[in-house]
Amino acid sequence: MDPSTKVLDGGWGWAIVVASFMAQLLAYGSPQSVGVLYPEWLHAFQEGKGMTAWVGSLVAGVGLIASPVCSACVDNFGARPVTIFSGVMVAGGLMLSAFAPNVQFLIFSYGIVVGLGCGLVYAATLTITCQYFDKRRGLALGIVTTGTSVGAFIYATAQNELIVLYGLDGCLLIIGAVALNLMACAGFMRPLNMPGYYLKQKAALERNTEEQLFEKPTLDDLKITTGSTATTPEKTLTVKELLITIDSKDLAIQTEKKKGLAGLAIMKVIKKKKQAYSKYMHSMYEILQDQAMVAFCIAVFLFSLGAFPPVLFIEDVAQSEGLIEEVSVIPLVSIGAIATCVGKLVLGILVDIRWINSIYLYAFTMFAGGVSLLLIPITKSYMGLQVLSAILGFFSGNWSLTSYITTKIVGLDRLTQAHGILMFFGGFGIMLGPPVVGWFFDWTQSYDLAFYFSGGSVVLGSFILFLLTLPCWKRKHSENDRPDVHYTSNCDKVASVA
């Protein structure tokens, strides 16, 4: 019955994939390569590294924390209008940043405005892609989400060259102008299903039209000139109007009954909303009672806290240690971005292997990433930093495993809620990590202690996740065990929140 099923997994869907890929590339290119801009902001504003780091942390964390709001906007208004609006936000925020007089203004223009715009793009592109694909949804989402990594690789080099040619302000203006192409990407996002806002407007319009039809016409409208074959447009009566006039007394009685029941209907709606809210809060409480889910939330928080700062600080580390005078042609951020892209694909393939436990695989990636962070302070060559950036970038691709692990822990019924909670912890860690590292540098005038803290946090998170998800805990609470999730039959629903 649904006509949209005829166009799934092909056709215009591949145009949607290309448009969504380009949208994520244009939106996330600059925020994901913000490490190139960070040293320039330090020299331009002469603020502490902890304060300046808020710019990069907010642009990455705000979109994640606000993801429930962004998803609600897409559900109500559709992917196309949201992408157009996000294009205005991202482009406007980047252009405003070119005129920033201080870091505080930059925190608002680049951190919050651009960050919210990126969150809207992310929600819109994933939603419209899921609508157009069913059996190939995992492949389509994989292609779309690699747009962030490809954008980081391209923008890191592009921003570096633009700063040399036009300065920091000119670079931000040009990047902002390029981001306006998000509106062109939105043009391809033809909706398959009417968004909630339009359905409400249509229902309201039909209701108002019906009320107008049921209104009793005035006596002037009922006058028809005898002997005349033509009437004015205002005086023309239709068959429906004549029938309504005849039954006006019955309709008046029905209207009075409706008015009398209006208050009762409102009370019923309020009661239903209250019950739904109570059920939602109870469900969240039950999710957080799951030991494995709590361990995973803590692990994601600690990983985000420790693994994201290198994206922002790695170029400044190389310059502070005297390993390189200025950003190279292929920055360390670009190397990490390409490695992350490869890591997403490889880890996605590994997690489909039946004998590999996805939770332990995530814990291993955390441990390996934490060790690479601990090695950064003792690395005294630029080549070593390049290798460590590639290793850390590869294991940072574990972000693509979060939805699969969440499904394994809480099941498909609570996947959306649990994934939202997880993204909140991840966004909070991303927002907090760079300022903490910056404050460590302001306190010690060295990045050594800061990266020991980051690496230690990630390693600690890996041990917490590994120990709290051991099989012995399941035997103690066997009565609360959940059935295993079979990904083969429900991969589409898991991928829809990837």
Image (cartoon, helix red, strand yellow):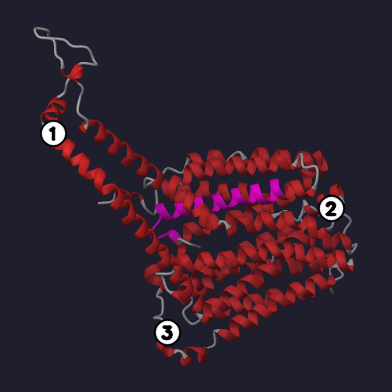
Work out whether mark 3 precedes mark 1 in sequence or the reverse, and give the earlier one: 1
Work out whether mark 2 precedes mark 3 in sequence or the reverse, and give the earlier one: 2
**Magenta segment main secondary structure:** helix
Mark 3 closeness class: few <14, some 14–19, many ≥20 residues within 10 Å: few
Residue that numbered label 2 is attached to: 42
Query: Horizontal and vertical percent for residue 324?
Result: 87, 59
Q: CA distance from mark 3 to mark 1?
A: 63 Å
Residue that numbered label 1 is attached to: 249
Q: Is residue 59 visible?
A: yes
Q: Is residue 191 left or right of residue 150?
A: left
Amino acid type, residue under disc 1 in the picture: Lys
Element assignment for label 2: helix
Residue drawn 57% across and 81% down? 360
Residue that numbered label 3 is attached to: 481
**258 or 350, which lies in front?**
258
Query: Horizontal and vertical percent for residue 41?
Result: 81, 50
Residue drawn 75% across and 68% down? 387
Query: Horizontal and vertical percent for residue 295?
Result: 57, 78
Q: Which residues are magenta?
A: 108-137
Element assignment for label 3: loop
Q: Is residue 235 left or right of residue 192?
A: left
Indicate the quadrant where residue 489 lies. bottom left
Amino acid type, residue under disc 2 in the picture: Leu
Q: Is residue 218 left or right of residue 323?
A: left
Q: Which mark is residue 174?
A: none
Work out whether mark 1 precedes mark 2 in sequence or the reverse, and give the earlier one: 2
